[in-house]
Image (spheres, rainbow, N blue to C red):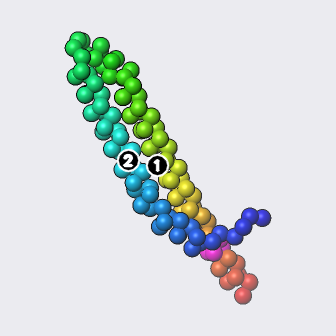
Amino acid sequence: MSDPIDIFKCLDYIRDHAEEYAQAKANRLYLEQYRKSQKALLMNQIEGAQHIREAYAYSNSEYLAVLESYKTAVEIEEKLKWLIESAKLKVEVWRSLNASNRFIDKVHT
């Protein structure tokens, strides 16, 4: 069988990583908005039809660098999110097991 759930370790993990998760989410949201600004700045660098300026912006190395940063930010945020969710689920499992154990104890007394 697996190791017993250390409820305090789970709670500590959530507390200890809350700020890191908040920063990761803030970074992702910032990059979502920055991507739009970067596209507009790049589009303003050349003259021409909308679709030509847009193609220029999307293919520009500066825009691609923003996308790479955005990808990294999403990856970090999602990893932290699911590690925290995992800790929360362990807490729920611990609660269910304890409730079941209390019920069994009542039945056998």
The answer to whether one can see residue 62 in this image is yes
Left or right: residue 9 compared with residue 50: right
Q: Amino acid at mark 2?
A: Asn
For label 1, the residue is 77
User: What span is in magenta?
Assistant: 95-100
The vertical placement of 109 against 16, above or below, is: below
Q: Residues within 10 Å of mark 2 (few under 14, many from 20)?
A: some
Q: Quadrant of the N terminus?
A: bottom right
User: In this image, 66 relative to 100: left or right?
Assistant: left
Residue in the foreground of this view, choosing between 12 and 90: 12
Residue 83 locus on image (x, y percent): 55, 56
Q: Where's residue 82, x and y in %?
A: 53, 53
Is 9 part of what is drawn in magenta? no
What whole-number distance in Å separates the C-alpha atoms at marks 1 and 2? 9 Å
Q: Amino acid at mark 1?
A: Glu
The foreground one among 52 and 99 is 52
Residue at image mark 2: 27
Q: Disc 1 on helix, strand or loop?
A: helix
Q: Which residue is at a point 44% across and 55% down the rendered structure image?
A: 21
